[in-house]
Image (tube, rainbow, N blue to C red):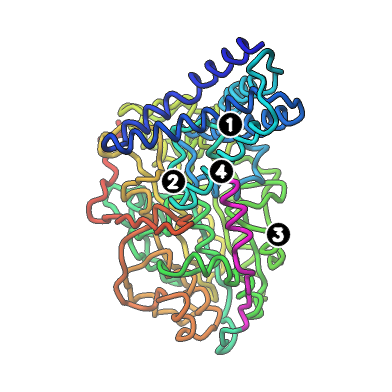
Amino acid sequence: MNALKAILLLVWSGLVLIPDVLARMAGLDGWTSLIAYGALLAVTLAGIVVAALTANSPLRWTGAVLFAGGALVTTGFAQSTGTFLTYDAFVNLVGALGFTGEALDQFGGALARALAYAALLLLAIGLPPRGRLRLPLLVAALPYAVLAGLTALLFTRGGDGARGLPASYPSLSYSGLYLLETAMAPEAERDPTRFALNGEPAGHIVLIIDESIAGHFLDINAGQGVETPLSRSYPDINITNYGVVPSITNCSIGSNLGLRFGGTRENYREVIASGASIWAFAKNAGMRTVYIDAQRTGSALHNGMSEEERADIDLFVQFDDAPVLERDMRAADRIAAELANPVPSFILVNKVGAHFPIHDKYPDSHMRYRPALERGAFADIADTGAREGFDGTRDSWRLYRNSYRNALGWGVATFFERLLDQADLSSSVVIYSADHGQDLHTDGSTGLTTHCMPTPNGAEGAVPLVTITGSGRDDARFATQGNGSHYRIFPTLLRLMAYDPAQLGEVYGPDLFDPSSEPDTFNARFNARLGQEPIWVSIRADNLTNPVDEDAQ
């Protein structure tokens, strides 16, 4: 039986560990780092071996389940996304636990492979050892001592340093770090009433957060961009374009949290942890709160929304009976209907937008740009990290960009045509942006990713920012265009709700009425925890590669 256990452990190590070992070794500088890593690898492997040779059956199987579960999470993430599970990604993963069912549907093949690897490890540890190598109970504590030591080491390194170790350890150590952070976090005091109100909201306020929209692919920001109603003039509404601006971060959860809780580049972590949500501010100002979520169904919460936050939403709208392709259009209809309500409302909208897979994010009637990705296989999927059927070559990116532009023609252009045609905006303010941008590989590079990379280029954080105001509102102040960014949206919303702008500025920074300058950077390490600092990346708006008609025939 010891021989079988050894074979299973070797097979598991070869299938799961070797690629990350080679990747980590390639990134090390000097013999000192290599020796230190080798020692850490040896100790963690020894922990797995000792767990497998523990004589006590309940303890051995407990270890088998624990280490196999850890391996399942780490390898499942790697198989689904093609990237290593960092602590930042683990925190995002915890925030997405409500979508386990969707993950199983979307990443079934990848998770099945991860489950097979984890099952090998479960048997390799759990099967009873025989002969002289059976270890006594005292030695059996070694795997857990190694885990505790690694967790302490990662704590001192801000969560970094787990790559290239046995797949069980990263997610288990991250779990310990996360629980420790949660236990140490001060209790939130989410009270909006400490901010003064100077009157009452003048009408409806709408924040539309689109999904995966590259600001430099729209006609308002590029000569060959996709044509939209946002570039037109209207007699009864004012449209102000702030250009291509930086998002909060290049991943959905962080940007959405920042847009719902506010904060500046300096204090966003503290504000999100202890500040009041936009819903609480709106209710305190006497407004009705409406959430229109076109991305999810079945009342599922996402993008870090908790039940506590949900409790401040008066009307929660999802489109369970609508195909993915129709949900943004249904959202436009619903916005228009809510604006007809005489009670001033704050309305936040999460659109389907143009997240991968974009193959079926537009109807046949909107296939303006050809050749495009093959259609028909992803009609029921709103978003996924899987890349089945897309190989990331230069030719496939050309198809992708054409499909992406078609998707913008539907999800942005037709959406706003429908909204502006129906909605009474006379007493309304609409702020439109997206959660993050897209790396569409216009530079000819290959690969599979469009955003959420730990070392992103500027395009991942380059988003549109537009305000739309009705003629019945005195919001000519929007015509004063400063350096816009996601960080200015939250204080703008509060100012429109009649909160004192001077008091707001102390916590939430400048709003869109303030012409002062601002960095053109987004945060590539939003979950900067355990002493780590954010990583700021410039969107380099002047140097973004705009769409070119040569992509299409």
Amino acid found under the numbered disc labelled 2: Asp
Q: Name the residue under label 3.
A: 307
Q: Name the residue under label 4.
A: 173
Nearer-the-camera pick, 246 or 338: 246
Point out residue 548 in the picture as x, y percentages from the top left corner.
Answer: 26, 41
**Residue, far bottom:** 198
Q: Residue drawn at (43%, 52%), measured in percent from left and top?
A: 436
Amino acid found under the numbered disc labelled 4: Ser
Q: Residue drawn at (31%, 69%), measured in percent from left and top?
A: 518
Q: Quadrant of the C terminus?
A: top left
Q: Earlier in the sequence, mark 4 or mark 2?
A: 2
How packed is label 4: few (under 14 Cα within 10 Å), some, or many (20 or more)? Answer: many
Reply yes or no: does residue 189 show up in magenta.
yes
Question: CB atoms at circles 4 and 2 under 8 Å apart?
Answer: no
| Residue 83 can be seen, yes or no | no
Amino acid found under the numbered disc labelled 1: Ala
How packed is label 3: few (under 14 Cα within 10 Å), some, or many (20 or more)? Answer: few
Q: Nearer the viewer, mark 3 or mark 1?
A: 1
* 187 over 392 or under it: above or below: below
Q: Earlier in the sequence, mark 2 or mark 1?
A: 1
In the rendered structure, which segment of residues is drawn in magenta? 174-193
Q: Which mark is residue 160?
A: 2
Q: Residue drawn at (35%, 60%), measured in percent from left and top?
A: 245
Q: Is mark 1 on a helix, strand or loop?
A: helix
Question: CB atoms at circles 2 and 1 under 8 Å apart?
Answer: no
Point out residue 51 in the picture as x, y percentages from the top left corner.
Answer: 63, 28
Nearer-the-camera pick, 525 or 217: 525
